[in-house]
Amino acid sequence: MHVAILTNFATPKGGAEKVAIESARGLAERGVAVTLVHGVDGPADPMLDHPGIRRVGLSLTDVWERPAWRGAVEGIWNREAGRRLEAALAALPDKPDVLHLHQWTRALSPAIFPVLARSGLPVAITLHDYFLLCPNGVYYRFDRAEPCTLRPFSPRCLAASCDPQSRVHKAVRVARYFAQWTALARNFDRLLADRARVSDSSIDPRPIDIVHVSDGSRARVERFVRGVSFLRHHRIDNPVRVAHAAPADPASGDAVAFVGRFTREKGADLVAQAAHQAGLPSLFIGDGPLADDLRAVPGAEVLGWRAPSEVEALLRRRARAVVAPARWLETGPLTIYEALAAGIPAVASDRAGAGEKIRHGETGFLAAPEAGALAAIFSRLKDDALVRDLGKAAHARYWEAPMTLDAHAAALCALYAGMTGAAEAPSFQRSAVM
């Protein structure tokens, strides 16, 4: 089998690229031929250094690095991205069996959807966010600091001042949303309608197989696309790159830890406030617009980005718990899964997909993303015996059904076998597809 994975970058600029790169490596290690097509050229992640992985760069530019007007135009519809992708796919020495898209908003744009349809190949899309539905991508009202409750693309949605930057930026994203769904409907739904009317074996329309990374995000997306005939839905966990080792001793840690981008929607400020209220230090690994605000909170220690191995070592040494108190409906933050795998208790927002992996009171805690609720939990985490028991249970539960790279790749192989109608080879054993 040959799979072409499409994404914006060959280095992890965010969760989508991280999963795309790791998926490529996991598939290659299972004997699948992989072509990673990335919009922006540049250094590649070392995980892509594998004889089974071919890289193809399209020499595009990240729209965030363009002048505002040009970034807006190319973000809505980048004709050059479509042309270069079509040429790159045609130039491959062997035709892929499946195309798997992970992100398109930073370089590729909705202009790639007609190309995917014209290829005649099965198409999968992993949704790491809500850009398929929501103009700002996170289904969150930045103007109100709360999850959105509006129907996407309804008059109230279009009128809402929900974008984190400006109304002009919202207008650009609405235009991209409209271009995206117009391209999808014209190039996929039309073909399905043709198939129903025309008995012609040369017409081989295919649906798009949507991969969801949590049950919560799947339910939200399905709610709004119910009746869209060309979408099929699947559920596959993101991979977690934590080696099976002895559990950490979180009772020896001194702080609650947050790893990621320091923003209000991710709740970084809540961790600092709640830890201060509970009388615990807080540790922040990453960066973001709230960095200076976090440093101003007594007891907060702010570090920059660190390599994954260093992050794991820091958490094993310092963390009594890893916290992800997202205000938005986060699909599945990997930091929580990585903490559980290491035997560190996890505290997650009751709105986030990561909470689905936490057993409340046994392997960690779920809480409303509010400082008071988190402070009450952090106060309980002062109890060494409780923290030690939570960590041991987290480690045991996680490794009963680990979200390893191999399990992730096996699930993808099972998905691809279903998409192509191929009989599953021994290496394509079913795993986390639900």
Image (cartoon, rainbow, N blue to C red):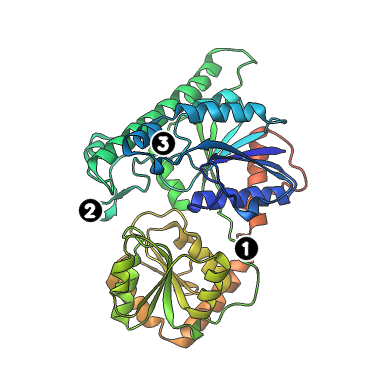
The residue pinned by badge 3 equals 225
Is residue 348 rendered to the left or right of residue 314? left
Query: How many numbered discs?
Result: 3
**Disc 3 residue type (three-letter):** Val
**Disc 1 residue type (three-letter):** Ala
The residue pinned by badge 1 equals 401
Q: Position of residue 288 (x, y in %)?
A: 36, 60
| 297 w.r.t. 227: above or below | below
**Disc 2 residue type (three-letter):** Arg
Q: Could you give the CA–CA distance between mark 2 and mark 1, rounded to whole angstroms?
A: 38 Å
Q: Nearer the viewer, residue 401 or 91?
A: 91
Q: Which residue is found at the position 56% from the left and 74% from the top?
A: 313
Q: Position of residue 354 (x, y in %)?
A: 46, 60
Q: Secondary structure at mark 3?
A: helix
Q: Position of residue 298 (x, y in %)?
A: 30, 79
Structural crowding at the residue carrying mark 3, measured as other residues with C-alpha within 10 Å and reported as few (<14), some (14–19) or many (≥20): few
Q: Could you give the CA–CA distance between mark 3 and mark 1, rounded to whole angstroms?
A: 31 Å
Structural crowding at the residue carrying mark 2, measured as other residues with C-alpha within 10 Å and reported as few (<14), some (14–19) or many (≥20): few
| 423 w.r.t. 30: above or below | above
Is residue 399 rendered to the left or right of residue 52? left
First in sequence: mark 3 vs mark 1: 3
Q: Position of residue 24 (x, y in %)?
A: 64, 47
Q: Which residue is found at the position 43% from the left and 73% from the top?
A: 257
The residue pinned by badge 2 equals 144
The answer to the question of whether label 2 and label 3 lie on touching residues, with beta carbons closer than 8 A, is: no
First in sequence: mark 2 vs mark 1: 2
Is residue 367 rendered to the left or right of residue 428? left
Q: Which residue is found at the position 47% from the left and 48% from the top?
A: 128
Instruction: Residue lying at the far right in this picture: please name it.
Output: 426
